[in-house]
Every structure is written in structure tokens, then in C-alpha cells.
Amino acid sequence: MINNNTKKFFFNNGYCVLKNVLTSDEIKNLRNALDEGLKKKNVQKVNYFNEDEKFWAYISNKKVLNSLNSLLNEDIFFMDGGFSRYDMSSKDTDKDKISWHRDTDSAPKIKGEVPYCKENNFYKVFTVMTYVNHDANNIISVIPKTHKPKYRLTLNNILRIFHWKTKNKKKISFLRNFIERLISKNIIVEAGDCLIFFVGLFHKPVSSQNFVPREAIITRYASKSNNSENYINYVLKNSSRVHYSDKKFLSLNKSKTFIEFLKKEKLYYY
């Protein structure tokens, strides 16, 4: 069970870290599945789990699900997810080429709905991120409290926008570094830990000096609400994340099998 202090921190700051959720065997199995899945497709990232049954045990991991249920005091359902291995030298992790982003950024914003919901204090869809590489600590930079609507009106947000607009401008990297130290917090996520955060929270990877690929599994969950309906209808159906987009979803291998798995685990939304 999650204690009250963790709950308070989570809702106030928008994230929390669950330590040692996965066993060494579970980490090993996920790493092997990631190797196989990425090599088969010859890519760095896969945005769906439908045809990769070796990941399904992670989707239904009881430690993760019970922790989310405890945090929210609500039943939660699977939204989407995927897995990746990014090289530190890639455009996706080069600190001069990136800034913070939200997990709703792959689709158009909808005023009063996404990424902020006028009916709530925050958008109630949640990302769970786990790293499976043992050879380095993985660091995620988060901007606390950015899941709340009032963040838009802060000086903090103006500095973030400046940071975003100055990507690829190495001449002012000292200023961008200063902004990072001022408004963000670095979170260490060790292999087997789970970082849980609101999809509306701004975050980005932090590159290390040593060349180490980042191997991650990501899932997203939500309780039944207007927020999750909007996430399915506006975010998933208008981005590369396709679980609930019927035309794309049903074209993937084993889609029906995957749906039956979600139903069995009581994670299917409909």
C-alpha cells in the first residue's frame, strides 16, 4: 500500500518513484524481450505491445497496478505503451537538441480538455516508466507541479518555453543549463524501479557522459473518466499510439488476442 505522504507528494508534484518493483528475473526477461522486439523491427522504439506477448506480464504487474489503485483509490485500465532503446548520441537524447515534453504532445491540444481538464485539478492519465539496463543509473529530468493548470501562468513556464525555443543553439547552452538547474529536478531511476507520473507532467531524459543505451518499458493507465475518454479519442487516435484506434489496431498481429488478455486481467477500458 502507498502511504499518505507518498500520495500527497504524488498529487502535489506530479510524480513518484516505486523502488525495486521488478525482480532480477523479471528485468532479465524484459531486457531479452526488448532486444528481440527491436531487432525484429530494426528500430529504436515500438509504440505498441499487441504482438509482443513477452511484455504482457509487465502490463498486468500486480505491484504496479496495486500501487496505482492505492494512489488513486480507483480501478485503473490500460491505455497504451511501448518499449525503446535510445543511444545517448541520438537526436532523442542530445541535450542540445531536446527540451521537456508531455506524453500528450503527440496530438493537438484541446482547450479545456487536453492536456489540462477544466473539470479537474489535473489530467488523470498516468505513465509508468521502467528501465531494464543495469550498467548505469538512468536520470529523468522532471518539472514538478507542471501537471496542474495554474502552471501555465508562472514564470517557471516562461523559462521552459525559452528553453524549448532555444534548442540547437549551443552558444547559449550555459543559459539553458542554468534554466534546467532552476526549474527542474533530476530523478534517478534504477533498473527495476517504476517512475509514475501524470501524462501532463513535463519531463525529458538526461544524457550521461558515458555512452550507455537507455532501455525502457513504458505503459499508461487511467481510471474511467472524461480524461481517459479524451485520451483515447483525441490523443491515441491522433498519434502514433494506436491501441484504441480501430482501423490501425485491428491490423496488428494478435490484436484480438491482446484484447482478450486485457479483458482477462480486467484492464480493458470498454
Image (spheres, helix red, strand yellow):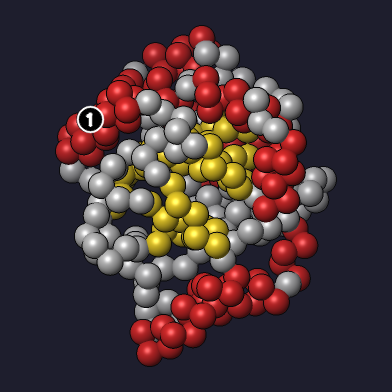
Judged from the image, the secondary structure of the residue bearing numbered disc 1 is helix
Q: Name the one closer to the observer, 255 or 159.
A: 159
Q: Position of residue 196 (x, y in %)?
A: 55, 41
Q: Position of residue 250 (x, y in %)?
A: 41, 24
Q: Residue at x 62, y 30 (%)?
A: 68
Can you say whether 224 is above or below 140 in the image?
Answer: above
**Whether residue 46 can be seen here:** no
Q: Residues within 10 Å of mark 1 (few under 14, many from 20)?
A: few
Q: Which residue is mark 1?
A: 32
Q: Quadrant of residue 167?
A: bottom left
Q: Name the one closer to the observer, 71 or 257.
A: 71
Can you say whether 266 is above or below 173 in the image?
Answer: above
Can you say whether 93 is above or below 261 in the image?
Answer: below
Q: Residue furthest top?
A: 264
Mark 1: amino acid: Asn
Q: Name the side, left or right, on which 68 lies relative to 44.
A: right
**Whether residue 48 can be seen here:** yes
Numbered marks: total: 1
Q: Residue at x 67, y 22 (%)?
A: 75
